Amino acid sequence: MSQLPDSTSDLSRRSLLRGTAAAGLLATPAVGLLSACAGSSTGDDKADTGAKTNDNPLGVADTGKVDVVVFNGGLGDAYAKFDVTVFNKKHANVTVNLSSTLKIKTEQQPKFSTTPADLINNAGADIMALDTLVNEGALTELTPLLDAPSWDDPNVKVRDTLLPGTINDGTFDGKVLVLNYAYTVFGVWYNQALFDKNGWTAPTTFDEFFTLAPKIKSAGVAPFAFAGKFPYYMRWAIMSWIWQSGGKSAVVDIDNLKPGCWKTPEVMAALEATEKLVKDGYTLPGSATLTHTESQQAFLDGKAALLPCGTWLENEMRQTIPSGFQMKLANFWGVSAADKAKGAVFAGSGENWIVPKKAANAAAGMEFLRAMFSVEGAGKFAELTSSLSSRAGSGDKVTNSTALVSAGEVMKKASGELVSFKHPDWYADIDKAEQNAIGELMAGRMTAAKFADTLQAATDKVAGDSAIKKFTRDA
Amino acid sequence: MRHGKARFVASFLVLPVGLYVFYVLWPYAQDIGYSLTNWGGYSDTQEFVGLDNYVRLVKDELIRKAFWHSVFFLVTVPVFTIALALLFAFLLNVGGRGSRAGVRGVWGSSFYKVVFFFPQVLSLVLIAIMWQAIYRGDEQGLLNGILMKIGLVDPEKPLQFVADPTPFLGVPTVLWWLLLIAVWGGTGFYMVLFSAAMQSIPKDIFEAATLDGATRVKTFFRITLPLLRDSVSVAWVYLGFIALDMYALVYVMTPSQGGPDHASEVFASVINFTAFNKGQFGYACAIAVALGIFTLLLAAVQLRVTRRERIEY
């Protein structure tokens, strides 16, 4: 498709035809339904693009509409509503149809191959599997957006305004297909007020934890709560422990399906420490059955002292945080004195935003994302959600949250590379096997050795299945 | 004239039949079509792979597991639901004390009827969420809380209910707890169904039996049950479908939807995982077709087995 109309008459004839087609679709809904049948091929129905200028680097048409879908979960949708006003400052005549939902996959998958929205916040429990979207070639490459000037400063490209890891997190086989908007720091939460009262300090190693835990327990509080019903919450902790114990290469080997990757002494040290935490009875009784919000509420109610979670915790639980509760984040503690990556922090961008390949107005979808990465948009996001945006400096003006400030401190003390792991996004089979095994490990029904055997078997099975597309990452 | 009448009737049926074909039959046909491809679900390209998906299905361990779980529900859900519903219906209609003349239900039967029917009014997801609070695995759970208070459960080791994969009578415990909910939710409806059928049995038959000295148990097995055969067989087929589904309860209540560790996997949860998590829509469609064939066979067998001469009264 040409970026500029060849001539005015050509443009008007094309728009006229398109208008007629649109009217026809409205008049006969059955035809529209037919074309919505999943998997059936239809012609591309792309919107016009406008001229590319410095202020409009993606060439968004002056008029028309852009469909944006935001996940109305832990972060809410108020920030996206604000971004509409930011967007309309530069594109006053483009209508933004912003819809918010919890059911991203239920609503978007059926029309993904024909008439998807232009920009989708693919997040939450009802998420469209990224590996599938990538393998099916269903996403628009976002490189033009990264190379475009940023919203506020034409001399700085969008790619240079993002926090470390953001672009890497959205890169699949060298192509940037996803941009994550939120920047999350993971770790173990504690209540500073409770710890001060009892003279406890947040543990920095498993040894410190095992010394502190009996004291916490004798005070009538369970040392450690977790969301057993959704085992991927504990995966963040376990993968961080594996990274700290064995260094980056331990996790890279797991991601790259290397033979024996789960059985190294370093990985086993992390798994055995986790097993001991459960076997010694330091978890909140019943934690293995709790949902994330149930376990989080138990933590807020003072029934448990420590809780692994990400920085969205404060926003998610805002309604029920007791007064006087000083929510603070500590980094996941180390595994042993032999740790290879001491003090590594698990942080990264989350909350996928994608532009479908079949989007009618992909340019405007990307432009909306550019508006979201503005100083104004990202600052509002941090203010509204108490979470950092993956736009650098988004949280600079927020001071009224101990959670956000402590997360900033964890980031300042971070040493070496950020913890990251890819295999659950890459291989649905390993994801499932791993979540099941973590559930069993944390319920005390599986030993660390059996855990390693199970995961090694699942990894080897995927590695040997030629029907599954493989990804690799560099050490 | 006759011809014109047919056309007149047909003109009324065009819309509903059209809608039915478009929304019910056409998706079935599409599903069968996709089951012969390797479609991933998000693109408009797919390759024809013949019966590969069906060959794979037969060897799939997870499907075998889901199959046996479905068989468990297929046997237990109808047996327990029908037995309970029959018992309640009998007590509510003809189980009253025989000290006075006539045949009546137990005292307060009209009140019980409403109470037993109540779960039917709630949506299945609502029921699942409600039972989640009952089954909750810490001291705040209704059952755990009560049992801890009276000292039957160790506060350090609360009951895990739907997060418990350990076998009980050879079947994962989580399935028994799900069964309890299914039976609790289904009994009321079939009780009303059986009540209606019982009321259409002439009272003089019961009275004659009572005069001849038949006990209530005898009346039930010799008169009520044989005359309810039709209703029971219909209930059996319906409950078979419900037992094959069970998906809503599994999806809402169990850890990682079919867990823990695949202990509550049913056909529909495997289809969901295969289609939406693994992105293998073609294969998932094949599983769905297999489930459809299985359901049809089941219905045919059940209707065949329970077919008998009708008793007129």
Image (spheres, coloured by chain):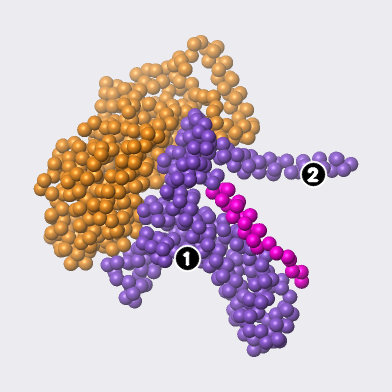
Chain colours: A orange, B purple
The answer to the question of whether label 1 and label 2 lie on touching residues, with beta carbons closer than 8 A, is no
Name, please, the residue furthest toward the left: A337
Check disc 2 and report its element: helix, strand or loop. Answer: helix
The x and y percentages for residue B41 are 48, 36
To which chain does the residue with label 1 belong? B
Name the foreground residue: A359 vs A341.
A341
Q: Residue at x 34, y 51 (%)?
A: A436
The residue at which mark 1 appears reads as B180
Q: Which quarter of the picture shows residue A342?
A: top left
Residue B257 location in percent, x, y?
A: 41, 52
Relative to B199, does residue A108 appear above or below in the rendering?
A: above
Which span of residues is magenta-colored?
B291-313
**Is B183 in front, or is A87?**
B183
Residue A86 inside the magenta-drawn segment: no
* Residue B307 falls within the magenta-colored stretch: yes
| Residue type at tag 2 | Val
| Residue depicted at 53% across the width and 34% down the height | B50
Left/right of residue A23 with respect to residue A388 in the rendered view = right
Residue labelled with disc 2: B9
* Separation of marks 1 and 2 at Cα, in angstroms: 48 Å
Residue type, numbered disc 1: Leu
Residue at (27% x, 42% y) in the render? A184
